[in-house]
Structures are given as structure tokens and as C-alpha cells.
Amino acid sequence: MPRDEAKSNLSALLESDHRYKYLDSFITLFVVILLISNIVATKFFAIGPLRVSVAQILFPITYIFGDIFTEVYGYGASRRAIWYGFFASFILVAISFIAVKIPPAPEYHDQPAFATIFSPVGRIVAASLIAYWCGEFANSFTLAKMKLITRGRYLWTRTIGSTVVGQAVDTIIVIAVIFYREPLGVIARLIVSGYLAKVIYETIMTPVTYAIVNALKRTEHVDYFDYETNFNPFVAEK
């Protein structure tokens, strides 16, 4: 792809859509939640035999946002939100790495604690970038196609169905990349624990998704169907 064409596609992917009142605000909130979830991802807690990252309190919300973007505004809006989140996460990786590597002032005594918290962020977010990109696009593509199949009915089937697909892709990739040195049994346990927690979380949140989707459709006067959408993640609609 020629450089000028690539720049044009990137600009189109990130271009704001001024037809809608709340889309940009929701994309901003989506990116903020994504970044926070990546920062707190290093801590795990126990729920019985399950081991769950603190990030899983927030990260599934990004998939709910993905459902909202695709259901209300269409796959194109979700594609733009995903790319915003991707670039923001990349900046987080870069700044975290630089912040740890910069020599501290002599009177700054918290460097070990700072490095302990932020050093893993680069590694974790790098893995998350791959998983996030694949999982979010799988989620949005599945929902958009299911909306066409169901003719816009039975919203719960596509919010849950897209979650089942998207979270499977995301969880398998991120756990496999981050914990590749661990025994296979540990990796499998983390994948199952994380996947079940995310799917159950988003299933419970279905009424909230319904409320937000219906409110936005009424307010924005839009209910987009991706009949002729180009689902290529790298190409914006003309």
C-alpha cells in the first residue's frame, strides 16, 4: 500500500463523526477504561479456586462499549474506537518504558516500587494489544453479522454471542502470550478462569447494555445495519 494511501486510510479511520452527539464522548470513556484496566492488570485476586486479574473488573466493560458502538452506530464506529484504544495503549507502553528507564533523582527513593508497578505494564500491554485488537474486532464483526441474521431482533443473542467469540479470542491470546513460560495446566486454568469471569460479567450486564443501547438509538435517531460494510479493519468507509 502506498504511503500516501496508508496515511489517508489512517486519517479516515480516526476522523470524528459529527453526525452523532454522544459517540465521541463514549469513545473517550472507552479509551480511559481500557488504559486503566491495563495499568491494574498485574494484580490478581482469588474467587474460590478461580484466579482473576483486577483488570477483569474493568476490561469486560470495553467489550460492552464495543457492543454499543456496533449495535447503535455500526461496525465503522466500533472500528474507529478500537484503533483509538490501540494507539492509546501503545503510547502507554512507550511512556511506561521510558518512565522506568529514566534515572531517578538522588532524593527519589521510590524507584524500586515504581519499577515493580510499571515495568510489567509494557510487557502486559504489549500482549494485551494483540489480544485486544483481535478480540475487539472479532466481537464487533460477530455482533454486526448477527444483527443482520436476526434482523435487529433479540439483542441479547448478539451481545452474548459476540462476547462468547470475542472474549475467547482475547483471553486465549493474552494469557498464552503473558504466561507462556508457565506450565500448560496453569495457563489452561488462567484461560478458563478469565474467560468464564468475563462472559458471566457481560451476561449479567446485559440489562445495562439494553438500557444504554435503547437510549442512544432514541436520542441519536440511529439504528445502523451493516448491509454493505467493508469489514476490513484497515480500511475506513468512504
Image (tube, helix red, strand yellow):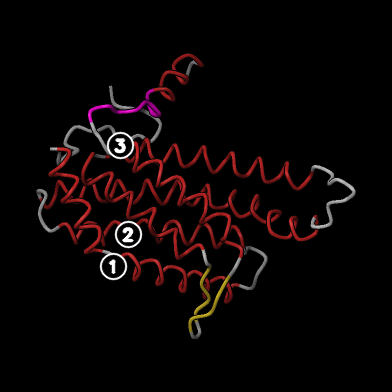
Distance Cα–Cα, label 3 vs label 1: 23 Å
Residue 203: image tag? 1
- Which mark is on residue 64? none
Who is closer to the viewer here, 125 or 23?
23
Mark 1 and mark 2 lie on one chain; the one further toward the N terminus is: 2
Please provide the residue range marked out in magenta: 12-19
Total labels: the figure holds: 3
Residue type, numbered disc 1: Thr
Q: Quadrant of the C terminus?
A: top left
Residue at the spot x=74%, y=56% of the render? 114
Among the two numbered marks 3 and 2 on one chain, the one whose residue lies closer to the N terminus: 3
CA separation in Å, label 1 and label 2: 8 Å
Q: Amino acid at mark 3?
A: Ala
Residue neighbourhood size for the residue with mark 1, other residues' Cα within 10 Å, grouped as few (<14), some (14–19), many (≥20): some
Q: CA distance from mark 3 to mark 2?
A: 18 Å
Q: Is residue 146 above or below residue 224?
A: below
